[in-house]
Image (tube, helix red, strand yellow):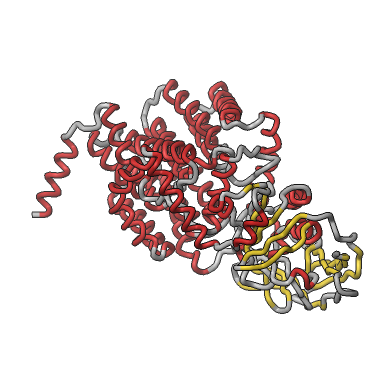
Amino acid sequence: MAGGQLNRFKSWCSSADWGSAPWQRVVTAVVAALLFQAISATEPPVGLDPSWESALALARSRDLDWGPEIVFTAGPLGFLHNPGFYYYGQSVLATGYQVIVLVALFLGIAAALRQRYAPTAALLGAFLTTGFANLLIASLYPDLAVLAAFAWAIVPLLGRDAKRSTVFATCITLGAVAGFQFLVKVNSGPMILAIALTLSLLSDWRALGRHSATVAVFVTSTVVWWLLAGQPIAELPVWLRLSVAVASGYVDAMAVPLFPFAIPSVLLALGWIAAICLLFVRRRPDIPRRFVVLVLLVSLIVAKTAFGRFDAGHVFILLSLIVVATVVTPSLRRRERSVALVAVVLVYLGLAGPLPLIRTEAIALSPVRAVQRLFTLATPGQWDRRVEESKARQRAQYAIPARFLDTIGSAPIHVDPSEASAVWAYNLGWHPTPVFQTYSAYTPMLDALNRDTLANGPQHVLSRISSDKPAKGIDGRLGVQESPLYSRVLLCNYELKGIENQWALFERVHSHCGQLTGVSETSVHDKETITVPSPSQPGKAVLVSLDLDQNLCDRLFQGTVAPLSNFTVALDGVTYRLVAANAAEPFLLSSPRSLDGTNIEIHAHTIAVGRHTSLGDTSASARLHFYEMTVG
């Protein structure tokens, strides 16, 4: 019975002509996109990632200049990939962008499938594939845009005799999209440009005019969208320079040494790469080798991203690529497709925890959510009500003391280490440090940029207090070390006004610190523990700088090639991760008692340096320079 119904369904898919007309494909894609987009909730939560999402919306609302006033892994159009509703204009534009990305992905997959399937069957395959990919990486729209670019690039490569005009139009379009995406998320633009150039080269490496035109369109698109985003053209070089610093610092500072839990994901990635290479060597007649080369290149780039910072979200991007590539590859045996898709599902379930249940519920509710979302955007009063409810929820969670809010008033503030959402929830004035989340100041250049802004910038700093003492940052970092210059300015140029409800309020005053004075220096080896010099008198702070002995393996395997190790510092027997690029800048080891209870409270008595690897902890060596500084 079931077999007969399945055969009838297959027969209908192969004979129906829905999808043969362009308007039919577009209508189907738009309906699918509205359903898939509704999987993500519009109510902004609190937390690390939601806070940077709110900061991108705040930057657009407050007309901040990207580069000198704000810098991140996104650009001035970064607010477009936020699923949450923050401001009305942002919500409308973001909804439009997200639907367009999903439509582009759907149509790209459908175009690839139409080369070997009937129109209706191709649309059904595109619907299922787009839905599965979106289920894996829901709300990561820049990465979905890369998948869409990949899908469109393979269409001419799968054709036996693709017209030169088709290849040219595809490359130029992808170049323009790459420029736009560059301002949405910094790494997505170059990835799409790489896909466009690879398509151009694989189609005809001698077509220098097409290669050059693709790059020229990318540059032009970047400049045009920069201006349309309301950014001064003079600040574009500044933003580019700082974005390079963020991207290069991210590689080492955010890489996490691979651990046993990562083995299934690593095996899947290696197996996938090996399978692609095998396809290239065996030369199946219906699978063009140039198509295989593009799949291999994009897979290597995405795999590097997935394991450069190993977490579920980054691995899911690789899984979604495997799904799309498996579906569109012609002439694969049913067993080969099944093995790839089952492996993806198993790795996903192993990493996702309760996420599949949450997203399954979201899928079931997506038709209702889609209608509600459109109704909310079309009814300003309804939108205002939902946003005020979201703000009220966040205020209840943050619980910033009323006396702090009275003190702040309308004065500009910076919120550290990461809770920029509080600015939106309480409608506060915002004057952030350019790297507005302190963990992102990966390099001395970025840390110095924050120092200079904080020294002459906001009237107040509102600090969310860590439950650990000394304060910990992400990945077990030592809070005062991840941004040492920033921490010293907060110590020296601000005065603590109060602590309450896990918040500390600082007010800017004249600098009240003396110069750093060298106390002693020593070398440490093999986890040797050194006693930290005591302050010579009350009101003195003790600091240390670390000249780490880094070998070639350290430089290559902290993230550049593969994340296998990172440096650590142990204070009083507790191990913290070091931001190696900032280790040479003196950071606090002993703070005045007046800072107790804040994130810059620290009273270390011993220190040791080590190295954490995927195989366990090992020794390291460094030269330690101790300093003392008068405070007050």
Task: Give x and y (percent) for residue 149.
Answer: 45, 36
Task: Give x and y (percent) for residue 35.
Answer: 32, 44
The outermost residue toward the left is 1
Viewer can see residue 289: no
Viewer can see residue 551: yes
The correct choice, above or below, for 417 with respect to 77 in the image is below
Task: Give x and y (percent) for residue 25.
Answer: 29, 32
Q: Is residue 143 rendered to the left or right of residue 417?
A: left
User: In what quadrant of the picture does the N terminus appear?
Assistant: bottom left
Residue at 54% from the left image edge and 35% from the top image edge:
193
Q: Is residue 340 rendered to the left or right of residue 47?
A: left
Residue at 52% from the left image edge and 29% from the top image edge:
176
Total labels drawn: 0
Q: Please tell me in which quadrant of the rendered image residue 231 appears.
A: top right
Task: Give x and y (percent) for residue 194.
Answer: 54, 37
Instruction: Tell which of 270 and 378 is nearer to you.
Output: 378
Instruction: Tell which of 111 and 414 is nearer to you.
Output: 414
